[in-house]
Amino acid sequence: MFGFIGAGNMVSALVKGAHANGFLTGENCLITDKSGISGPALAKSVAGRYLVSNLEVAKQSDVLVLGVKPQHILAVLAELRSVLETHQPLVISLAAGVKLEDIQMTAGSDVPVLRMMPNVNAAVQASMTAIVPGQNCTDEHIELALKFARTFGEAMQIQESELPIFTALAGCSPAWIFDLIDAFAMAGVKYGISKANASRIVTQAFLGSATLVREATETGTKSTANLIDQVCSPGGTTIAGLLAMQAAGSRHSAVEAVDAAVMQDMILGKK
Ligand SMILES: NC(=O)C1=CN([C@@H]2O[C@H](COP(=O)(O)OP(=O)(O)OC[C@H]3O[C@@H](n4cnc5c(N)ncnc54)[C@H](O)[C@@H]3O)[C@@H](O)[C@H]2O)C=CC1
Ligand SMILES: O=C(O)[C@@H]1CCC=N1
């Protein structure tokens, strides 16, 4: 049985993806949340069960996914500690920043705990998800977590020290990419194209470009630099635009975004 505490943006995306895959069904999915609004709606959408109590969900779950904000996760775990110690479900934390050490200490020293960092693209089964197992996780726990994560996209096991940068590059980057898509679409609007058409055009450009990069790098045929050269005709429109974009700080702004996200991860971990 999979239990979810919190039914906000991330859990909704993840449950939707795993349900579309057929992994989560009405039979193996329990959901609760504090608002009492998003939880019942999410449970209904996947024919799962909504329970009002975090404790009840913890008691009935073999895998317990904590989808509350980082600021709330330790309080939620503390409230569940005695049930977790007796029942020992695999506890999966989605929280950015909050360290395994703190999760373990609050959940109980024998409880298997694991950090998972998915992203909102899980809703369309296109997440890039990392897992970091805690000291009590067996090979079976790790396999189960990877199997679960692969129902809503790609997954990899990493070290906890790599999680801040993974969170920036995979967890946060969808928002940055949505913002870029919106910015290019607005430029289209400036030149008289409707926002809907401009968004459609730009979205297809992002999709196609990502697909091409993946194919070229997986087959080892071309690097991203080769692909850039392929589009920039000498004296052409692309090189003029690319140099303008770089002069405006596009490369630097990508690094700045990552630096700020990594810094915020550290701040969340200290709270
Ligand atoms: N939104 C995203 O793209 C990603 C979020 N995450 C992580 O996922 C977690 C959830 O983030 P979001 O879904 O964006 O937040 P959200 O604010 O959309 O959802 C939080 C949910 O937790 C529930 N909640 C709050 N306190 C509770 C309590 N005491 N008991 C039961 N339910 C409670 C709320 O009712 C709500 O359903 C965070 O820890 C975040 O770091 C990780 C990767 C990506
Ligand atoms: O903004 C956040 O803190 C969460 C973690 C990664 C994406 N959203």
Image (cartoon, grey):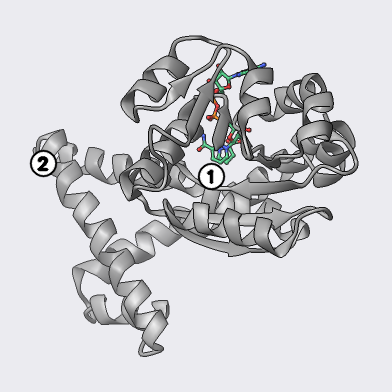
Q: Residue under circle 1?
A: 172
Q: Residue at x 9, y 39 (%)?
A: 193
Question: How far across and how far down the image is residue 213, in percent?
Answer: 35, 73
Where, by quadrant of the figure, is residue 82 drawn? Answer: top right
On screen, residue 225 above or below 176: below
- Quarter of the figure with the C terminus: top right
Q: Check mark 1 vs ligand 2: CB closer than 8 Å? yes or no.
A: yes
**Residue in the foreground of this view, choosing between 219 and 198:** 219
CB atoms at circles 2 and 1 under 8 Å apart?
no
Where, by quadrant of the figure, is residue 234 drawn? Answer: bottom left
Question: Does the image show residue 256?
Answer: no
On screen, residue 97 above or below 204: above
In the picture, measured across the screen, residue 72 lies left or right of residue 203, that is: right
Res 107 label: none
Question: Does the image show residue 83?
Answer: yes
Q: Which residue is farthest bottom?
A: 221
* Label 1 Cα neighbours within 10 Å, binned few <14 / some 14-19 / many ≥20: some
SS category of the residue bearing label 2: helix
Question: How far across and how far down the image is residue 172, in percent?
Answer: 53, 44
Question: How far across and how far down the image is residue 90, in percent?
Answer: 69, 44
Q: Residue at x 63, y 36 (%)?
A: 64
Three-letter amino acid code of the residue under disc 2:
Asn
**Residue in the foreground of this view, choosing between 195 and 66:** 66
Q: CA distance from mark 2 to mark 1?
A: 26 Å
- Quarter of the figure with the N terminus: top right
On screen, residue 7 above or below 204: above
Three-letter amino acid code of the residue under disc 1:
Cys
Q: Residue under circle 2?
A: 197
- Of labels 2 and 1, earlier in sequence is 1
On screen, residue 144 above or below 228: above
